[in-house]
Amino acid sequence: MRNSATIKLFLPYGDPKRLRTAEVSNWTGKALAGPRTELDDLLRREEVDRSGVYFLLGNDPRTGGPLAYVGEAEVIRERLKQHRSKEFWVSVVVFVSKDENLTKAHIRYLEARLMEEAKAIGRYNLENSNMTGAKLPESDREDMEVFLGRIRQLLPILGSDILTPITGSHAPESKKEILSCEIKGASAKGRRTETGFVVFADSTAVLRERPSAETKSRYVVDLRSNLIDEGTLSENAGFLVFTKDAEFNSPSQAASVIHGGSANGLTAWKDQNGRTLKQIEESATGA
């Protein structure tokens, strides 16, 4: 079942990088987003007098990796003012209810669920880690899960992938979507996603890079080193094993990590019938 939506975006200054609002037809919520440089303008809006949840998004100054703070407040304006002291964040996304029916229990429930999902997806580290949550009646939980679904839909449109699964926003419709990349005993599985290419957990890559990689494919050496340092790749039984799903910019970048040197992802990835990714896509487009 498709969770289709009609979304209304409004750009107060006509610039998609500055302050913007988003609403979904027949939804009681509203989103506001903007860079830190627009915080004063956001704080002047009447919507932030309400209760809601919010995301502060930026990078960890120590590691350079994505870092987020997920919060809730009965008066969003006052809480955001307090966060001026946090240096890391460069953008903010706020979600409130237009009918002002979000209680303290509702927003605590939403905060805990948002943090739970963000941690499970793993795109961002969270600066805050305590999830207190709140107990709600069954009907209220269902309402908040609908609210949560709209937050998931709007976040990518507002510039954040914090709740976008690394494996893509939809499950594979069939095994045909799953591709394999094999070399020298290493075997990996993955597929295209909306943002690139994902290699699934438990896939393997060759343990050593090709001798020529140091001079001809240095980026592959560096990328594999980074994946090892962050724990995404771990040595086991003569191979490097993917400990979790890993996202790459392209099929070729993914294949190069598996091969230990430069590789053409359009020919390295194949389906269960042995067709290359290039052949699959040419067939789909009638080329």
Image: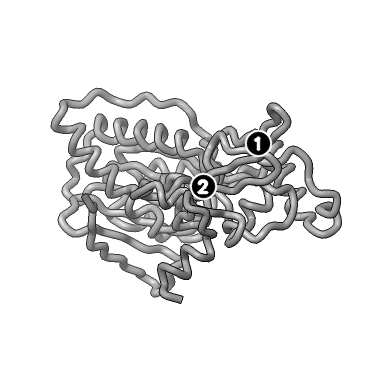
Instruction: Report the front residue among 228 and 162.
Output: 228
Dot 1: few (<14), some (14–19), or many (≥20) neighbours within 10 Å?
Answer: many
Q: Residue 142 sits in which quadrant? A: top left
Dot 2 falls on a residue whose secondary structure is: strand
Instruction: Report the front residue among 240 and 34.
Output: 240
**Number of the label disc, if any, that sits on residue 165:** none
Q: In this view, does 15 lie above or below 163?
A: below
Residue shown at 56% from the left, 34% from the top: 202
Dot 1 falls on a residue whose secondary structure is: strand
Residue found at the very far front of the displayed protein: 273
Q: Which amino acid does label 1 sit on?
A: Leu
Q: Which amino acid does label 2 sit on?
A: Gly
Give percent across and percent down for residue 268.
Answer: 61, 55
Q: Is residue 118 above or below residue 36?
A: above
Q: How many marks can you see?
A: 2
Give percent across and percent down for residue 113.
Answer: 34, 33
Q: Mark 2 points at which residue?
A: 190
How did the renderer colour the structure?
A: one colour
Q: Name the residue under label 1.
A: 233
- Could one spot residue 62 in this view of the protein? no
Residue shown at 46% from the left, 54% from the top: 193
Mark closer to the observer (2, 1):
2
Residue shown at 45% from the left, 26% from the top: 130
- Whichever of callouts 2 and 1 sits on the residue coming sooner in the sequence is 2
